[in-house]
Image (cartoon, grey):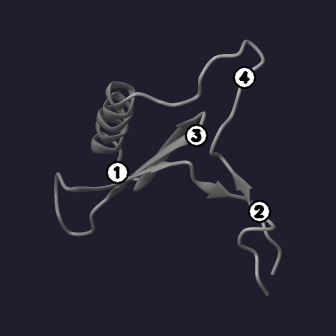
């Protein structure tokens, strides 16, 4: 079964009601990355966290068996959705 792209929403150009731009700055993305790493560093139970706004999604995952190393994904203009098996 094909889900991409018909079953997914494309976060390419989103306009908020106030007309503001949804392109997230590099500064804000770096703040998100650093904040997620800080939160993961103090948690023994959580291994992955993410945040998103506008057209950008950031996900940070602890690397297995590697203390103080994290896998970071920054997705701009990404596709997302819920599909059934």
Q: Nearer the viewer, mark 4 or mark 1?
A: 4
User: Disc 4 versus disc 1: distance between alpha carbons?
Assistant: 37 Å
User: Where does label 2 land, which residue?
Assistant: 82
Dot 3 or dot 4, earlier in sequence: 4
User: Where does label 3 land, which residue?
Assistant: 55
Q: Position of residue 11 (x, y in %)?
A: 65, 46
Q: Nearer the viewer, mark 2 or mark 3?
A: 3
Q: Quadrant of the N terminus?
A: bottom right
Q: Nearer the viewer, residue 59 or 28?
A: 28
User: Circles 4 and 1: CB distance less than 8 Å?
Assistant: no
Q: Residues within 10 Å of mark 4 (few under 14, many from 20)?
A: few
Residue 44 badge? 1
> Which SS class for mark 4?
loop
Residue at coordinates 58% horizontally, 28% vertically from top-left? 22
User: Circles 3 and 1: CB distance less than 8 Å?
Assistant: no
Q: Quadrant of the C terminus?
A: bottom right
Q: Residues within 10 Å of mark 1 (few under 14, many from 20)?
A: few
């Amino acid at each position: 079964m094909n889900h991409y792209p018909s079953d997914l929403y494309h976060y390419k150009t989103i306009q908020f009601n106030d007309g503001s731009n949804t392109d997230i700055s590099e500064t804000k993305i770096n703040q998100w990355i650093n904040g997620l790493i800080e939160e993961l560093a103090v948690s023994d139970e959580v291994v992955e966290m993410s945040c998103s706004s506008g057209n950008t999604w950031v996900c940070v995952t602890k690397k297995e068996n590697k203390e103080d190393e994290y896998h970071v994904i920054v997705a701009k203009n990404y596709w997302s959705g819920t599909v059934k098996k």
